Structure formats: structure tokens, C-alpha cells
Amino acid sequence: MIEEPVSAPVSEHAEPEPIPSFDITISRERIRIAVALFYFCQGLAFASWASRIPDIKSALNLSDAQLGTLLFALPFGQLLTMPLSGRLVTQYGSHRVLRVAAPLYALVLTCIALVSTGWQLGLALLAFGIVGNMCNIAVNTQGVAAEQLYSRSVMTSFHGAWSIAGFTGALIGLLMINLHVDTYLHFWIILICVVINTVINQKYLVRHVVTEQRKTSFFTKPDGVLIQLGIIGFCSMATEGAMFDWSGIYFKDIVRAPSSLVVVGYASFMIMMAAGRFLGDWAIRRIGRRTLLQASGCFIFVGMGIAVVFPTVTTASLGFMLVGLGVACVVPSIYSAAGRNANISPGVALAMVSSVSYLGFLMGPPLIGYVAELASLRYSYAVIGLFGLMITTLISMTQVVKNEN
């Protein structure tokens, strides 16, 4: 077990830096594996939901606009609990929050499979977003703490584990659909996997000394750096939200892919996002974080453009792969920068940046639905593609992200 350190008294003006602690008998590699597996399980649960969206949409007989409205609930739940999640992580430690929130997140997932009306789906997604946000802040605080055990960037590899889980979840979803396994049983299999991981790996999570000085108020006016990081995250998460929630429907309605290939677009996006994240730490050391993020925005714009202009299975899959490569390193980079903020505790700083970023998740998917209802889903994706140009422009115009490794 990782021993819980006893904190010494600190002065009133002590710096609110995180104090990671771990048993010296446990290697940092084992800690890194444990943290990565929690990222993986969270991504697996989310991808399982995403893989079943077309089925749930059809079962509830929802229009594009109705689905778009209901999809507000998930990111709204995430946004609603940002202050609470940041304070819980700061006050009780990310390791304690994560060991409770991770299995609860998968449990709520199973409830989604039981809905029979639109309003029930909305309530289930709201709960899914609330618990998911607690997982998100806790696991990213763990990622920042684990990164401090290394002298190099490792954060993108953690998000790579989340992306691998997304690809795995898409494949599992495809398998379940083709085997005619109902959604409820599918989601219970995921819950069992998450519980097993929590039981095995919770003792390897990084623990923190919690002091009174680190109880930073969420409502303290954030500095400009956190706001700018949040805006960049907004653009990336709006793109991710469009891909997570609508890629299957895009392949079904626009690409006209056969039912057995509907998940291919989502899987293409996820596997390239995972690959980009596993290569991201190496790329940051080679060309710098700033240059990498400028290129990322261009990949998003070009990839979405290909999928919109050439809506065939092959070309749309290629376009989605470029989009996945583009979004790969944006969120890990801004979270890493936020977690190293010298003035605010990691949990609260991540919550502040996430609050702005998750507005992208809040606005992106519903925007897709409304534009699709008025015009076409192709126009919706064209609009989302512009967020890639915004990322490149914001990175180029500001010094919020530098070419550090």
C-alpha cells in the first residue's frame, strides 16, 4: 500500500503546490500503469455509450434535433459539478474521489440502457455527466501528480490510454451489435471490468497531503492563462464532442455505410487519436508543444473538410483519422499546463480550465443537431471543422503554450 504521509504544519503563506506521495517500494512505472488503467476504464465506459447512440436513438424514435437537445444533458452535468469536483479532489484527494467515482460512473452507464423515453435518457445522461466529471478531474489530477515523478512529459500517454479505450469500446460495441447482445448486458460487462480494475489498482494511485492552504476557492478570479487554456480546450472538445456523439450517425445518414460499418468512422477517429497521444510526448520533445498544437489545429480543419467534401466510407474514414490526430494532444497539453499552475491547486485549476473547455462538449453536439435539422449534417461538420483553424490561430497569437518539453 502507498503510505498516507502525515503533513507538517505549514505557514499561512505556503505555496499551494501539490505534494505527491508514494511508497518508495513501489516503482513509478507501476504507479504510471495504475493511473493509465483508470484513464482506460473511464474511456471504455464513455466509448460504450457512444457506440450505442444510434441504437438508442432508433429505439426511442428521436429526430436529430431531439437527440441534439438531449445530448445537452451529459456535458451540462459535467459543467454543473465543476466547482464541486475541484473542491472534492482538493479537500479529500484525487485517489479517494477516483476509487468511488470510477465504479459509480460505470454503474450509471447501465442505467442509460434502461431508459424508455426521451426525458429518462436526459436524466440518465445528466447523472452520467455529473459522475463523469468527478472521474475526469480526479484522474487528470492523478495524471499531473504521476507526471511529477518523471522529468519529462508523460501526460499525453495517459490520454492515449483513454483513447485506446475508446477504440476498444467501439470494437466491443460493434461486436455486441453484430452478436445481437442487448445494450443492458453490454453495459454490465463494462461495469464488471471497471470494478475489477478499481479493486486491483486503487492502492497504486498517487496520494497527496491535503492542507488548509490548498482549499482554493473555485470562484476565485482565474488568471488569464487559465482562461486562454480553457478557450483552446473549448475548440478541441467541441470537435471531440461532434465526433463522439455524431460520427456514427454521420456514417449512417451521410456516408450511407452499411450497418456493419457504421462504427468504422468513430473507430478510425479513436485509433488515430490514441496513436497521436502515445506519440505526443515524443513529438513534444522533438518539435515543442506550441508547434505541435499549431499543426494539430490544421489537421482538424483538413480532416473535417475531407469528410464533408468526399462523404464515402474510405475518404470519410481518412478524414476522421486526421481529425483524431489533430485533437490528440490538445487537451493533454492544456491540462498539463493547468496542473502546473503555481498559484492554484491542481484540482481547482483543472476544474477552471475544464469549465471553459467543457462548454465545447456542451455546445458542440447540440449545434450539430440543430444545423443538421435546418440544413444537413454535412454543413454541421463543416462548421465544426472551423474550430481547428481557431486552435491554430489562438496558439499562434498568444504565448499561453510555449515550446517547452
Image (cartoon, grey):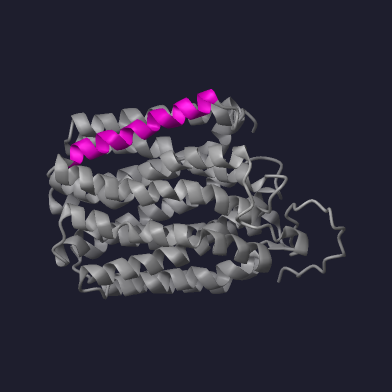
Q: Chief secondary structure of the magenta span?
A: helix
The reply, left or right, for residue 274 in relation to residue 156 is left
Give the vertical position of 323 relative to 62 (above or below): above
The percent coordinates of residue 340 (x first, y second) are 67, 45
Q: Determine if the magenta segment contains residue 387.
A: yes
Q: What residue span does the magenta drawing correspond to? A: 377-397
The reply, left or right, for residue 85 in relation to residue 209 is left
Which sits in the foreground, 255 or 210? 210
Tally of numbered tags: 0
Q: Residue at x 37, y 51 (%)?
A: 362
- The C terminus appears in which quarter of the rendering? top right
The percent coordinates of residue 392 (x first, y second) are 45, 27
The percent coordinates of residue 330 (x first, y second) are 49, 39
Give the vertical position of 279 relative to 351 (above or below): above
Give the vertical position of 177 relative to 16 (above or below): below
Q: Determine if the magenta segment contains residue 149.
A: no
The quarter of the displayed image where residue 286 is located = top right
Q: Residue at x 28, y 74 (%)?
A: 184
Which sits in the foreground, 179 or 247? 247
Q: Residue at x 52, y 64 (%)?
A: 134
The quarter of the displayed image where residue 388 is located = top left
The percent coordinates of residue 61 (x first, y second) are 13, 63
Residue 201 visible at all:
no
Q: Residue at x 43, y 57 (%)?
A: 43
- The N terminus appears in which quarter of the rendering? bottom right
The reply, left or right, for residue 297 in relation to residue 286 is left
The quarter of the displayed image where residue 316 is located = top left
